[in-house]
Amino acid sequence: MFKLNLKIALRNLWKNRGITAINVGGLAIALAAFILVTMYFTYETSFDKSNPNYENIYVVGRIYPEFKTNYTSPPFAKAIKQNFPEVELAGITKGGFFELVIKKDKNTVFAKNFMQADYNAAKILNLKPNNGLEKPAGDVEGLSYLSSENMKALFPNKKDNKPEMVGIGASNSGITSRIDGGIKKDLHSNIIFDGISIRNELGKGENYGYNNYTTYIQVKPGADIGNLEQKITNLYRAELLKGETDKKTIEEIKNVSTFLDPLSNLHLRPKAGNDAPYKILIALSVLGTLILVIACINFTNLSIAQATKRAKEVGVKKVMGAYRFQLTSQFLVEIFMQCFSATILALILAELILPNFNNLFQLNLSIWHIDNPLFWQLPLVLLSITLIAGIYPAMVLSGFKPSLVLKGNFSTSKQSSWLRNGLLVFQFSVAVIFIIGLFIINSQLKYMRSQDLGFTANQVVYIKNIMLFNKPEVFEPVRERFLKIPGVKLATVATDVPNGAENGSNGYTTNGLQANIDFVDVDFDYFETLDIKLKDGRFFSSSFKTDTANAAVINESAVAKYGLKNPVGKTIRGCNIDYKIVGVAKDFKAQGFESAIQPTIYAIKNPCGNYKTQIMLKIEENKMADALIALKAQWPEINPKDGEDFRYEFLDELYGKLFKKQEQLQSVFFAAALLTIFIAVLGLFAFAKYITNGRIKEIAVRKILGASDVQIFKLINRSFFIMVIVANLISWPVAYILTKKWLETFAYRIDLPLLPFVSSALITITLTVITVSIQAKKAVKANPVDALKYE
Amino acid sequence: MIKIENLEKIYKTEEVETTALNGINFHVKEGEFVSIMGPSGCGKSTLLNVMGLLDKPESGSYKFIDTELLTLNDRERSNFRKRNMGFVFQNFNLIDELTVFENIELPLIYNKIPASERKTLVNEIIERMNIVNRSGHFPQQLSGGQQQRVAVARALVTKPKLVLADEPTGNLDSSHGNEVMELLCELNETGTTIVMVTHSSHDASFSNRIINLKDGHVVSEKINKRRNEELI
């Protein structure tokens, strides 16, 4: 019996090969998208999962009334370990501050993040140097390891794991250091480094004020985390209160608390950070699933639409004594076969798209590796889609009454046409939402690109540097050298460049108000180099002697924050210095579009600040190339520390990276929207074909009675037209809410435009009318006599 | 062999109720060839469907050699049908995707006959129906008469006790129609009981007994003397 059923199935599929191709092809495309999304989801949610203690590792962070941070101080980890037996290990790490230049003979590598970790942290984080994790013993303070890639670059011919001596910095710096081996860099981890130094102890002698470290703890399985969190908060307050007499400080400490953030949160939704990546991932998964659902709907719809063709077969088989169950399973097997072929096709498609996908998300995913969870996920998905797409048609088909269908004048009931129409409306609703979403993402990105940033990143070259220029008199001769190079118009140095990174923050008081605001320590010509506009007063100038001592410029947001009326000339106190406000700078978007502009103070002198190392030069566009060549040539003299290693970036490119995430989102949305529309139109195409075929006799009769072609086009389009309108009406409010939510993640955003809503309606209506009319044309052009003779 | 008593069947739609069978009483003896005639809508097809267990009446009794069939569940009805009954339809109802051979083989498969035996049985009947050179063709490649022969072959291949025919010549021209009727007569002569619904008194003249239905009742019954005499 199976053989005959197989024959019936294959011959049927072949007879309707157009529709079969649409069914299987559409499903394969959707499945391919789904496979990619599933792989991406698995990848993104499994950071550090290879760590055997994944479930039991937490980052300890601090909560202040105004912010949350993962930065903690060295003594804290020790205190936690000593006080709480449920904490098995506690360790700390510290990120690298400089880009380290490491040399061996003629080979050079730049280690952007040469981090430090104490032995416990290395154990918690499962950091395994190639020759095994060792505790620095005896006089050795620490063991340094370079990532395998860097190791390979420095020692291309090295085969063993023996320690090597390398030079640090410029070749004439004379600094050498020992590298104890290589360590495999795991990109699928939250702990990313180019090199690492594993220390016996980190931050020796540093107190609770040195919040430059990340504290990791590993708890015993089953520990009560909520309780531990509370106990750690109490411990932290107690530690801070030790020896504290200042009443105000004591009051403040009572408002400080701590939190434990599981390792599994760190990549996508750290408590001290934003959860946008997580939301995007969820959105992406929903997109992938929706596309698959839409393809399944096509399947269901077309299978039911074709039911009449199979009705006779069902009737005959029932008359011959087939059970309903036999027929149901026959149809399910048929649908399974199609889904199976679609899955194979989908795997091939996914493999073909994967390189582009990897490129877009800068990943290195592959399908064919043994521990890919896809190999159990996919059969599950295959079964699910077979059931979703197949169960209803199988029930409908196997439920036909032979006494009705065998009379030969059978048509599917009204009831199932309701369902089909409903499914079609659903498909188009999703398509409309995607189209609207696409338009709005586009407008926002366009707005971001064209919007005035408040500063000009064009023609600004950012030079990487390890010399400290905190004192203006140290930078002055350097600036003079720069300015002698033809094309260099301005030169300055600061603690931060406007590349989206966060600035440092500190407490400042003015107007009787104390607040934590951002600080950026600058040098002369900082505002001029970046072309930041002046609102009031003046910028720093070397003609004012006091500018290097206690002058400050604040931005508009800071003026607003403190509620200052005439800020110029007023005093603002911070770091035990009474700064005189000499000017107000217009706000500029140093941190991109997602976060609002922070109240910021700019000063030349700031003992509590960071290192001024970030050099920025404004260079004339047409002399750019020559200037860069000259800079490179003169760099060893200008900056003996960096020596021959002249490295630079264009600030506009650096700032442009802030848009990358949004651009990824745009590409994904574009692909998803196109796919959905494509699959929905495919479904519509086949469905319209079926509907028109079913109405050929009606059309013939109408034509004989004198209907014109246009009237018949209208007749066939009418129901589809209504469905598309309904789909638009349903999806507008949904799209409105979703896009509004998305736009709210931007501090600077467009007003929700109306045009996308209208355009999506126009697009879907046009597509529908074209698709349906192509099918209707055949029926209209056919000779009515042929249609009627057949009955 | 068949005893039908007080059979009642009502079709309900949202607005109207149609009584198709209105307390019908009706008997068929083993080996008989009965024609059911009557105007359109008199209930003859409904009666045939009920007899074929394709439709369930509201009330009444239907005994087939002392077995009451109306109390059976779906599965039992399927089983009874495939073992005891064969069907011939006006519009043939062959499966387009299967060849002549495969179409005829189908009921045997549902009766779980082993493949080798199936082959013998199908070949036997194909020969008897004179369609040997058509066995690999698909239904669309045959003339109407040939299609109906295949349908008859399919109905007979399981050697059913009862063959139900619903206007078997309705879609055929008169010469092909006669062929089919002669086939049914031959079949009847070898002992198969046949109940046939027909519009044509010519076709009915081939049977032993003609029953006239109107508005769901049996209005008259007539023994076909000529045919009975022929038989004697």
Image: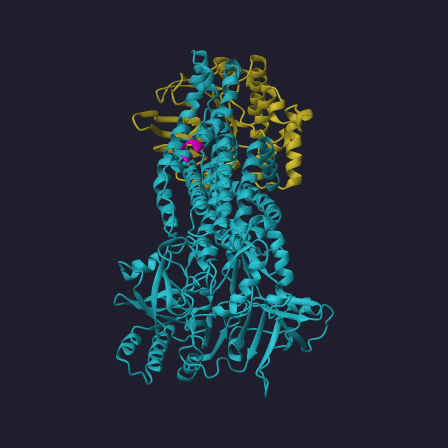
Residue A479 left/right relative to B211 = right
Q: Is residue B16 visible?
A: yes
The image quadrant of residue A577 is: bottom left
Between B212 and A777, which is closer to the camera in this rendering? A777
Q: Is residue A427 above or below residue B139?
A: below
- In this rendering, position of residue A711 left or right of residue A196: left
Considering every residue shown, the one lying at the far front of the view is A543
Q: Nearer the viewer, residue A627 or A595?
A: A627
Tell me which colouring the rendered structure shows.
Answer: by chain
- In the image, the segment drawn in magenta is A760-764
Q: Main secondary structure of the magenta part?
A: helix
Chain B painted colour: yellow
Q: Position of residue A463 (x, y in %)?
A: 56, 61
Picture quarter with the C terminus of chain B: top right
Where residue B12 appears, as percent x and y from the top left, is: 33, 29
State the image quarter where residue A130 is shown: bottom right
Residue lying at the far right in this picture: please name it. A157
Judge whether residue A720 is colored magenta.
no
Q: Quadrant of residue A395?
A: top left
B105 versus A492 height, above or below: above
Residue B80 appears in the figure = no
**Coordinates of residue A641 in the picture (x, y in percent):** 60, 71
Q: Compared with residue A773, is residue A524 higher up or lower down, i.e. above or below?
A: below
Q: Between residues A147 and B5, which one lies in front from this camera angle?
A: A147
A575 vs A145, left or right, is: left
Closest to the observer: A222 or A271?
A271
Q: Position of residue A176 (x, y in %)?
A: 64, 77
Image colour for chain A is cyan
Q: How many marks?
A: 0
Q: Is residue A762 magenta?
A: yes
